[in-house]
Amino acid sequence: MSATDHYTIISADTHAGASHAIYRDYLEAEFLEDFDAWRAKYKNPFKDLTDQRRLRNWDNEMRNSQQDADGVVGEVIFPNTIPPFFPGFVLMAPMPDESNYRHRHAGIRAHNRWLADFCAEFPHRRAGIGQVFLNDLDDTIEDVHWIKEHGLRGGILIPALPPDATWLPQYNDPVYDRLWAVCQDLDVPVNMHSGSGNPSYGRTPSAALMYAAECLTFSNRQILYFILGGVFERFPRLRFIMTEQRCAWIPSLLEGLDRMLKGVRDRGALGELRFDKDAVLPKSATEYFQQNMKVGVSQPNIADAEVIDKLGSDFFMWGSDYPHDEGTHPFTREHLRQVFEGRPESVMRKILGGNAAEVYGFNLDALAAEAERFGPTVAELAEPLRELPENPNEALLQAGERAL
């Protein structure tokens, strides 16, 4: 490889969704009357879904041109916008219960149908992730098969389960084993994105602040259910990806779990706590992480990048979080130069595209022409960025206006 070669960049975290008018065409006929009544009352509180920026979610020309300009030629697509019958933003909506499951489930099935068509327009560039709920595992497994059969090679998105959703078992419960078995057998990646998992904070002035302060906590803690609950022991080929949850916290967590599990294996006890043989796991937490997991690290900071030196480069998949305001667009090149200074080309190729290609089934040869045209060169990303523009917010605003 030479300094003039280009990187093939695949963002492991982007978002897309349809408008309500588009989603209507993907709803089953029995829900149309209810949808029209729901839509007539709905008022969208999100500015980026009411102004011109909303088009980035479904307009191919706008979306592809912005991704090309940013040097990104492949994308793993999580949901965005507001699916039918949802009370708010798709990733932050509370879990459905018996009273609203049927309509909410119809809403995510409409989104999945739309997403399959959206990805099929540029199949070499887009790996869509289908949504599932867990209220009825027969429905869930039916949806997994549909997602696999309709080319959504990003796999499935499962929610982080909040502690107050008492009608749903937590992920350490073997009741979900038949779901994991299907995902393992079909080689369907299981994804969990930040945003879900928080309990209700009530209608208080501090509710939004509480959510923001604890959002990553409730997302991050789900790893405990999969490791300590023995999911990865029972399903060693299950692929589990945690996205937009940072990763600087992972090494210390794994180190602590390794010590705890070793104590249980060696002594069957932790202090005064005694454990029966069913709680004894034969491997360390680090081994389960390496066996089953990847991390989609969206807009990583330097502390996140340093984790590569501790855990290796095979688990790390870079993400832009496009089109969200906190993402790296339209300064992805500058971001990569600032965060990954000094990384060898072999590592950069893995974390910027190779790992995501392996997990989500991208064909790097099919992306080569776009990467050569739009991707940054090895020499460009090797140039450190240690100073920001004098007025970065103004520059960002101007770039955003140009993109629109």
Image: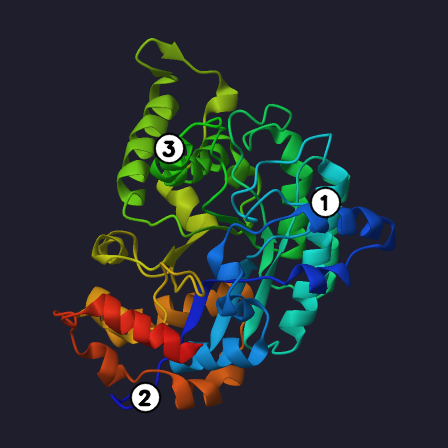
- Which residue has dot 3 on it? 210
> Callout 2 environment at 10 Å: few (<14), some (14 to 19), or many (20+)?
some
Quadrant position of the N terminus in the picture = bottom left
Residue furthest to the right: 30
Name the residue at 51% across, 70% down: 52
Q: Which mark, residue 105?
A: 1
Q: Note whether residue 331 is visible.
A: no
- Which residue has dot 2 on it? 5
Secondary structure, mark 2, is loop
Where does the image place residue 232, in percent across and percent down from the top left? 51, 41
Where does the image place residue 6, in percent across and percent down from the top left? 34, 85
Gap in angstroms between the C-alphas marked 2 and 1: 46 Å
Query: Closest to the observer: 76 or 324?
Result: 324
Image quadrant assignment for residue 318 = bottom left
Name the residue at 57% across, 56% down: 81
Q: Are marks 2 and 1 in contact (CB under 8 Å)?
A: no
Q: Which mark, residue 141?
A: none
Secondary structure, mark 1, is helix
Q: Nearer the viewer, mark 2 or mark 3?
A: 3
